[in-house]
Image (spheres, helix red, strand yellow):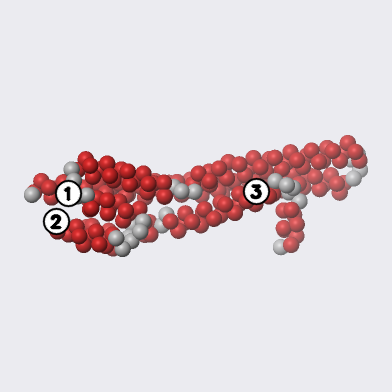
Amino acid sequence: MIEFYQSLAQGGIVMIPLSICSILALAIIIEKFIVLRKRKVFNPEITSVLKNIASPDDFPLALSVCNNYNGPFSHLIIIILQNFHQPLEDIKEDVADQARQEINFLERGLGILETVAAIAPILGLLGTVFGMIRVFGDISTQGVGDAASLSSGISEALISTAVGLSIGIPTLVFYNYFFQRANSIILELEKISNELIRKIRAFKQES
């Protein structure tokens, strides 16, 4: 293990920003795994009470259940239930405004993941350039006879590139995964919200 960290340290100064990138990416990946769990977003109790709404008289119970939970799902449903007496177009505008805030919450941190995925390989290439500059500098001053110095510079070049790619590639994979997962949740939120609004429309037409 010590030898592993020593070999990473040979990657040069770019290992510092690469380390920061890896920590940021790991923290966001863990957070997204927690936040974007469908069971966490779509609380079963809220889903159940919404399915059992048969008349406006059921709205207070549904509202009280939603108030017990904090999240995008409950926030959107609360907006609809609290304003069900308003014209449908006004309800839709309120839902759209709230949905934009919830989308920002669901996609929070994905921009950082995308940035890390883009710059980590570039930082690795920068480390390669620094390592090769060092190699050619050693050659110009000492010739090609100092194998230890040359291997150290080449090692710096190769390690930084390998680390940059090792951070960038999985980060890009996780970014695409979480982006698609967030979009799937957003579409499901939109579907459930529209179903509830259609119920409200039907209740108003019956009254």
Rendered-image quadrant of the N terminus: bottom right
Which residue is denoted by mark 3 in the rendering? 18
Task: Return the residue at label 2.
Answer: 55
Real-space CA distance between mark 3 and mark 1, rounded to the nearest whole angstrom? 54 Å
Q: Residues within 10 Å of mark 1 (few under 14, many from 20)?
A: few
N-terminal of the pair, mark 3 or mark 1, is: 3
Q: Secondary structure at mark 1?
A: loop
The amino acid on which the numbered mark 2 sits, given as a three-letter code, is Ser
Which label's residue is closer to the chain start, 2 or 1? 2
Task: Quote the CA–CA distance across marks 2 and 1.
Answer: 13 Å
The image quarter containing residue 43 is bottom left
Characterize the local packing of mark 3: few (<14), some (14-19) or many (20 or more) Cα atoms within 10 angstroms: many
Estimate the x, y position of residue 135 in percent, counting from the top left. 82, 41
Q: Residue 85: which numbered mark, if any? A: 1
Image location of residue 204, percent across then percent down: 12, 47
Amino acid type at circle 3 is Leu
